[in-house]
Image (cartoon, grey):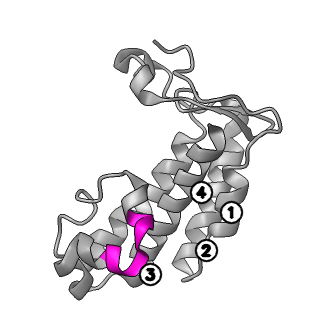
């Protein structure tokens, strides 16, 4: 269901912000166990690999990776291979596992009419986070579902 996908994305973005604003050497040393203690089931329910993010002992690198992941998630939400958008609202999420890798790569671009919105959204999020504030208000708008959102599919990119 699109609402489930949207919820998972929003939780992941909140978790990445948590890392940006709270990561320190102590947390890095304790890795996942510490996050589970702090966030409880939210970490377990993300179903994303956190090891890539935390395979460093450098706090700056962990923050930089988390910020990069946030921007990448926003960018993916505007690519033809990841989402169908209608009037900037998400009409359908596309499931990567159901797509041909080759065809996915060919459709991993942003349509011209969405470029301004994408760049504006990335800019707003970056400014907010670099000022030390949560960008959650923007995430809710960026990942807003259309009133006629479809159940997720492969998007015809098989």
Name the side, left or right, on which 44 lies relative to 136: left
> Residue 146 location, x and y as percent?
78, 39
Q: Nearer the viewer, mark 4 or mark 1?
A: 1
Q: Residues within 10 Å of mark 3 (few under 14, many from 20)?
A: some
| Circle 1 Cα neighbour tier, 10 Å, few/some/many (<14 / 14–19 / ≥20) | some
Q: How many angstroms separate mark 1 from mark 2 (CA)?
A: 9 Å
Q: Whole-Å distance between the Cαs marked 4 and 2? A: 10 Å
Element at badge 4? helix
Q: Which mark is residue 138?
A: 1
Q: Is residue 78 above or below residue 33?
A: above
Task: Give whichever of 148, 138 is nearer the camera.
Answer: 148
Closer to the N terminus: mark 4 or mark 1? 4
Residue sitting farthest toward the front = 41
- Find residue 64 and report its horizontal and vertical position in percent: 35, 68
- The residues bearing labels 3 and 2 have C-alpha atoms spaced at a distance of 12 Å
Q: Distance from label 4 to label 1 (Cα)?
A: 9 Å
Name the image quarter holding the N terminus.
Answer: top right
Q: Quadrant of residue 149?
A: top right
Label 1, label 3: how many angstroms apart (C-alpha)? 17 Å
Range drawn in magenta: 35-43
Q: Which label sits on residue 15?
A: none
Q: Is residue 57 magenta?
A: no
- Of 141 and 68, nearer the camera is 141
Residue 21: give its label: 3
What residue is pinned by disc 2? 128
Label count reads 4
Q: Quadrant of residue 42?
A: bottom left
Residue 122, numbered label = 4
Image depth: mark 1 or mark 2 in front: 1
Q: Nearer the viewer, residue 113 or 33?
A: 33
């Amino acid at each position: 269901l699109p609402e489930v996908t949207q919820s998972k994305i929003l939780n992941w973005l909140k978790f990445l912000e948590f890392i940006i604003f709270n990561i320190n050497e102590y947390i890095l040393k304790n890795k996942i166990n510490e996050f589970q203690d702090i966030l409880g089931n939210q970490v377990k329910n993300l179903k994303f690999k956190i090891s890539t993010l935390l395979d460093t002992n450098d706090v700056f690198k962990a923050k930089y990776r988390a910020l990069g992941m946030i921007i990448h998630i926003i960018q993916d939400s505007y690519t033809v291979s990841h989402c169908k958008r209608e009037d900037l609202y998400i009409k359908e999420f596309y499931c990567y596992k159901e797509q041909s890798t080759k065809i996915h790569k060919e459709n991993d671009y942003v349509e011209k009419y969405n470029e301004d919105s994408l760049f504006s959204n990335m800019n707003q999020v970056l400014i907010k986070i670099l000022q030390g504030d949560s960008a959650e208000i923007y995430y809710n708008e960026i990942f807003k579902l259309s009133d006629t959102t479809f159940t997720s599919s492969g998007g015809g990119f098989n």
